Amino acid sequence: MAVVISLLVFFVTIFLGLEVAFVFIVTGFTYIVLTQQWKMLFTITQIFNTSLSTWEMMAIPLFILTGELMARCGLVEELFALTNRVIGRWRGGVAYATQVATYLLSGIAGSSNAEAAAVSRVLYPLLRQEGFSPGTASAIIAAASVKGAIVPPSMLYIMYGAITNTSIEKLFLGGYTVGLLVMLGHITVVFLKVRSDPNIGRISPGGGWTGLLRSFIRALPVLLIPLLILGGLLSGWFTATETGAAAAFLSLVSGLFIYRRMYWRDLLDAFLVAARNTGAVMIIIAASSIVGYFLTYENIPQIIGNFLQEYIKNPLVFLLCINVLLLVMGFFLEPIPLILMMMPVLAPLALMYGLDPVHFGLVVCLNSLLGLLTPMVGGVLFVVSTITRVRFEWLGREIVPFLLVSWVVLFIISILPPSFVLWPLKLVQY
């Protein structure tokens, strides 16, 4: 009964708009009061310290710093200029270039909301100029921005890996496949929209081969960062954390000496912003460890697992049921609290059913991110709507095709063998 009441407190407080970190803390203290487990009060600091004192968690501040440094260098413009010169000559080319550019930019931003904010100001006017309606242009940007947390580096992968003791390097490598499938699905939606609307034109980038070469040279530093992440992981030279350090260093060099859009006096502000964002994430992770602790203490994963195994024998059926559960919860919860809340329970169940932990992690991370495109939570939708000043209901209507395609991709990833999604692992031995 104490667990049930504590979980009710969790959902009530989160619906009331309380900050996520305080939601976890209130939930944990509710359990302590109801069970009279006062000794847990003396172990909370140890629980906090244990949840954060891991090598994997070091990757979070490093990739946050990387994103902050690169955001100050104008890399969105440089990367989009290159992709637009390559594929922007077709009708609706700016929309296609948006999907490809955000796939590459995802290796820098690491966050869907951050990527949505970065690309909306740059790409929305170009999409409108090409003939897309305000709602469609905003939907294209919102859908593309979700890849910010699908393609490595992703804080969700780091959190999932740290919570479940799963290889973050393998999650990163599998994330490239998942992001590619989502990108192809969104490109298909754009293609159908372009074909159905004769008013959509094209913006010729011009410049010929000389312009393409110039754009490639200017975008080369930003291209090196995702290549550094992928190459370092495939070669085994870097762990995920070490890759974050290398990416942050390359970002610093690019901003100061290559693009020269950042000065030494800007570094302090960049470090302060990165530290503030890191602190916000770390507080949520530490606070969630209280809830994870009492769920484990009460043997909730084992109890639920024994119950489910009486009625669900097939691992695939179990995975599809988990997908439905997370999709519903994703209507109300942001991805980070959803992962931190559910993985201490669901990850042991997945192992009981014999599911590959890396494949399961990729599925649940993608699932949780789709809530960013639904009207209830819609974090990305709110960001894009605010910046583009498009009415939220218009954006919500236009995002539906992209959301449906994303659900199809999620279903495909769920039913296909793990070896299909994790094919990059065949290139390297972990």
Image (tube, rainbow, N blue to C red):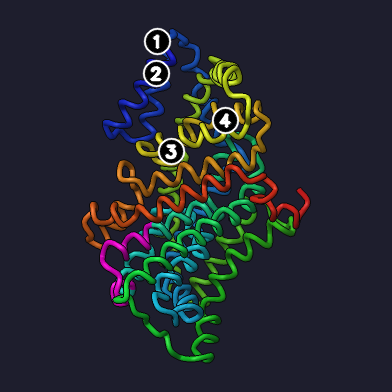
Distance from disc 2 to disc 3, alpha carbons, whole Å, reads 22 Å
Is 140 contained in the magenta span?
Answer: yes
> Residue 6 got which mark?
2
Give residue 430's position: percent from left, percent from top. 76, 48
Q: Residues within 10 Å of mark 3 (few under 14, many from 20)?
A: many
- Residue 208 vs residue 284, the one in the foreground: 208
Instruction: Say above or below: 285 vs 309.
Output: below
Q: Which residue is labeled 4 in the image? A: 318
Eye-nearest disc, 2 or 3: 3
- Residue 277 vs residue 137, the one in the foreground: 137
Q: Amino acid at mark 3?
A: Leu
Eye-nearest disc, 3 or 1: 3
Q: Secondary structure at mark 3?
A: helix
Look at 50% across and 12% down and name the residue there: 39
Q: Are marks 4 and 2 in contact (CB under 8 Å)?
A: no
Give residue 177's position: percent from left, percent from top. 60, 55
Looking at the image, is mark 3 or mark 4 earlier in the sequence?
4
Eye-nearest disc, 1 or 2: 2
Give residue 248's position: percent from left, percent from top. 55, 60
Q: Which residue is labeled 1 in the image? A: 34
Count every numbered label the image shows and give the total. Answer: 4
Look at 55% across and 29% down and name the residue there: 346
Q: Which residue is labeled 3 in the image? A: 327
Q: Amino acid at mark 2?
A: Ser
Q: Residues within 10 Å of mark 2 (few under 14, many from 20)?
A: many
Q: Amino acid at mark 4?
A: Phe
Provide the residue span drawn in magenta.
127-142
